[in-house]
Amino acid sequence: MAQLLDGKAHAQRILDEVRTQVAGRASAGARPPCLAVVLVGEDPASQVYVRGKVKACAETGIRSLEFRPPAELPQAELEALIDRLNADPEVDGILVQLPLPGHQDAKRALHRIAPGKDVDGFHPVNQGLLLEGLPGLRPCTPSACMRMLAAHGVALKGLHAVVLGRSEIVGKPMALMLLEQHATVTIAHSRTRDLPGLCRQADLLVAAVGRPGLVEGSWIKPGAVVVDVGINRIEDPDLGQRIFRAEPRKLATLRDKGAVLCGDVRFGEAMEVASAVTPVPGGVGPLTIAGLMANTLQASLPG
């Protein structure tokens, strides 16, 4: 049976570190870091995510500002709001919650954020700094995952890491961070030939494709470490029967409540093969918010 990589517990350690540093700066007379969160429209999932981020700010002593313009907000007005926040010396970090309404260009909005306030780490300048191995604000999810792997003593040097997913948010930056730690990295995706066979070569498998239960237990190399970044809501009983064969509790939840959360990896099957696995929920999700708090603190520091 695999070890459980408890992202929730490690996220709390990151939050505790941030709170201690914020309190220390406050005792020296510094103002608290400030995070501005922009939520356009009323997407229910986005509202949940924003509440979690604002709660984490309160827990760590970070000041939060919320801006909730209507879904009809024109692109130009969204960019004007970002410009005002860029110019505000009291604001250290800016987060535009995704997804944006369909008429808005998310990349244009994200690229409008000043690189030094880009606490999501999505700006091309910060992505370029990561590519060159230079200090900068790095994407929250992969950077927090790297901290978790280090805390659990996963020695990355020389490992073959397969990153399943090529997004700018997780897949690509995760691959670069693993390369920094001297892993040998393969990036895979939906068009990769013999995807199961490639995954079976991985000493470390990072799944970040947003496809529920894609990675079966038979895809996992015995003793591998599995990091499941996916979070998917399942309502289809037939799909649940296929992917939860080794998780009767998930099936029961799906039957009783009509929906259940799961990752990109078949967790029950992975636990029988791997050496360590992150759960969903309670794995990578909490790490993302903790990474955001750490980035906001970093953005507030001089220089």
Image: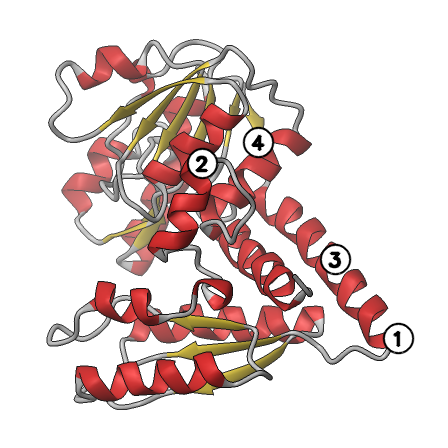
Q: Amino acid at mark 2?
A: Glu
Label 3 sits on residue: 16
Label 1 sits on residue: 27
Q: Residue at x 81, y 70 (%)?
A: 25
Point out the image quarter for the N terminus.
top right
Give the number of the mark in front: 4 or 2.
2
Where, by quadrant of the figure, is residue 109 drawn? bottom left
Q: Residues within 10 Å of mark 4 (few under 14, many from 20)?
A: some
Label 2 sits on residue: 132
Is any atom of residue 212 visible in this view? yes
Residue furthest to the front in view is 303
For the residues labelled 4 and 1, the Cα–Cα distance comes to 38 Å
Nearest to N terminus: mark 2 or mark 3:
3
Point out the image quarter for the C terminus.
bottom right
Q: Amino acid at mark 1?
A: Ser
- CB-based contact (under 8 Å), mark 4 and mark 2: no
Nearest to N terminus: mark 3 or mark 4:
4
Reply above or below: 225 against 148.
Answer: above
Nearest to N terminus: mark 4 or mark 2:
4
Give the number of the mark in front: 3 or 4.
3
Nearest to N terminus: mark 3 or mark 1:
3
For the residues labelled 3 and 4, the Cα–Cα distance comes to 21 Å
Judge by depth and name the residue closer to the eye, 264 or 153: 153
Would residue 21 be found to the left or right of residue 187 on screen? Answer: right
- CB-based contact (under 8 Å), mark 1 and mark 2: no
Q: Amino acid at mark 4?
A: Leu
Label 4 sits on residue: 4
Give the number of the mark in front: 4 or 1.
1
